[in-house]
Structure formats: C-alpha cells, structure tokens
Amino acid sequence: MASVAFMVQAIVVREVPSDGKPSRVAALEDVSESFLGDGDTVVDVAYSGINYKDALALTGRPGVVRQTPLVAGIDLVGTVVTSGDERFAAGDWIILNGAGSSENRHGGLATRAHIDPALAIPLPHGMTPARAAALGTAGYTAALAVARLLREDVSPEDGPVLVTGATGGVGSIATLLLSRAGFEVAALTGRADELGGYIRSLGASTLVDRSELNSYGKPLQSARWAGVVDAVGGAVLANALAQTKPGGVVAACGLAGSADLPTTVMPFILRGVTLAGIDSVWAEPAARTEAWHLLARDLDGDVLDSLTETVSLTGAIAAAERLLDGQAHGRILVEISGG
C-alpha cells in the first residue's frame, strides 16, 4: 500500500501570466512536503510574522522574491523535527531570520519548513516563541543596530540618539531598547500629529519632524546626535551623518526612503563619525545570538504584546495589504500552530 504524502499548508508566491506579462501572486496552498526541498533540518513552524519585506512579497511586489514558486516568510520560530546540526535536537525551539528565506529559499509562512540550520539560533532563555516571532527580522535588526552602538561605546552621557522611521518595525523596537538603556531618544517621524503619543509611549523624549531631514542639506550641520539608528537612507541618512557629533556612530540598517546616499567625506574626516552597516540577512550566529539576548534581557514583553496584532496564516495576505496601505503599525504576528 502506497504511503500518503505529508501535506503542508503554505503561502506560496507563484509567477502567473497577466496581460501577456508575468506577474507574481501569493496564495495559501496545500503542498506536498517534497515541495519544501532538501534542507537538512526539518522544523514544525509555530509562528512567523509580517515585516515590510514580507508585505511586499505577499502582495506581489518586486524586489524580494527572486525565484518562483517560493514559500514566503523571512522569519520562522518553531520546533525541530529532525536535525542536521549537532547544536539542535528534536523538540528544540529555534529562530531563523533572513538567510535567504523568501528570497531564494522557502520561508516560514508554512506549517513546516526544511532549512539550512547554519544561521539558526536557539530561542533565548526568557523569550517566548510568540514574542520572538512578533519581533521577527525588524526587532532583531533593531537589536543588531543598538548592539553596534553599545559596542562602539556610545553612551547616554554622550547625548541623544536619533531613530529614523520611528513608527516602523525597526524604529519602534530600537526606541524601546535605547530608552531602556537610558538614552534620550529623538524619534524622526512624519506622523507626529497622528502617532506622536504612540511614539512617546515607546520611550522617545523628542519628536523630530521628517521634513527637517528630508531635503539635502549642508555636508556639515549643527552636531546634535551621539548616535543614529537609520532605517530610511537617502537624504535622511545624509543629513543624520552631517548632524552627528564628533566620534558618533550611525548604524544604517534600511532603505525605506531611498538606497541613495548623497553625502560627502566631511563627517568622517572632520568629526570622526562612523557609518556602521547592519546586515541582518547574513549576520553570523554570534551576532544573532547577541542581538536576541539583548532583546530577551531588555525588552518589556508586556509593551511588545500591546504593540502586536495576531493573525492566522489564512489572514496573513490581508494583513500585508493593510501594512502597505499604512493602516497598521506595531508588529504583526502570524500564528501558524501556536506551539
């Protein structure tokens, strides 16, 4: 008697013809486990999440998914079924962020995943699986950026730290972490009237209107910031560099505004400013572990819960559409099996 194939529920991005041109569409499907490929560690996924990149993939936008068909989801939190890595055993909780997921490897928006475990890490003590997935790549990226500032010896006594894109996933978690570490946080936003109270509730002490940094300014400006966490890029990053104090550190971790960097060498050679790049996709396990331990130690779980909306796998695509339409802020957790 032939064995019955194990079926997996997954959100799959496929390329379909539309008006004679290829178009990408994401849909919830039942697929055979063989569809997931040959990753040597099998994980039953309990939770994933929806970040900005996920929202692009789930709504068919270009720039994230590089091959099709592909299971979406750049994050996963789940339990090991079988392990190809001596660090993990069956039943262990693990986290995987990025590492090509939803780009050229099947991702975490599925009931099961086959992964390369090289960049996976154990769920840290004190962090629940649901909270880890709610934080996802956005929270982990914020922690990488904050950890870099701390490693470069930026301290609260040096002055305020600017966080750009403060209502976004990276900016909101960076604000929480920096505030908890004792920093005065200046939050850059274009939605102060609408979301000023929310941003202050995260720990920001000052709101900076986005228009102040949105246009290209002088290569050196009044020195205001001991450090910067920037998820915007473009003119905002250029102006932030020009306003950073001597010896300050700017952690660049996103391009929500632009991939351009129209700046000069002046902040670097006259003020000794450091521009530190934050790579969350391919960061080594040691950096990932440091970031997740920082989140487990310093992030108030109750505050995170208050910022988190939970949806099912069946509701993930609609949630992605709301995120891109600007109708959602905070974190979106996708509960797949609930652990």
Image (cartoon, rainbow, N blue to C red):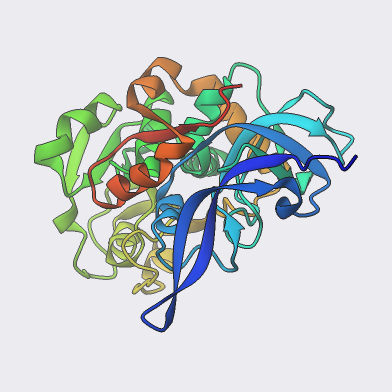
Q: Position of residue 271 (x, y in %)?
A: 40, 60
Residue 195 drawn above or below residue 10 = above
Q: Position of residue 258 (x, y in %)?
A: 34, 67
Left or right: where 183 falls relative to 15: left
* 95 or 65: nearer the viewer: 65
**Residue that extends furthest to the front in the rendered view of this protein:** 1
* 307 or 13: nearer the viewer: 13
Picture residue at 39% right of the left edge, 21% below the top:
305
Can residue 271 be seen in this snapshot?
Answer: yes
Q: How many marks?
A: 0
Picture residue at 78% right of the left edge, 23% below the top:
91
Left or right: where 285 falls relative to 244: right
Picture residue at 46% right of the left edge, 51% below the top:
54
- Give the quadrant of the N terminus: top right
Q: Position of residue 103 (x, y in %)?
A: 58, 61
Left or right: where 241 falls relative to 119: left
Can residue 227 be seen in this snapshot?
Answer: no
Left or right: where 257 falls relative to 200: right
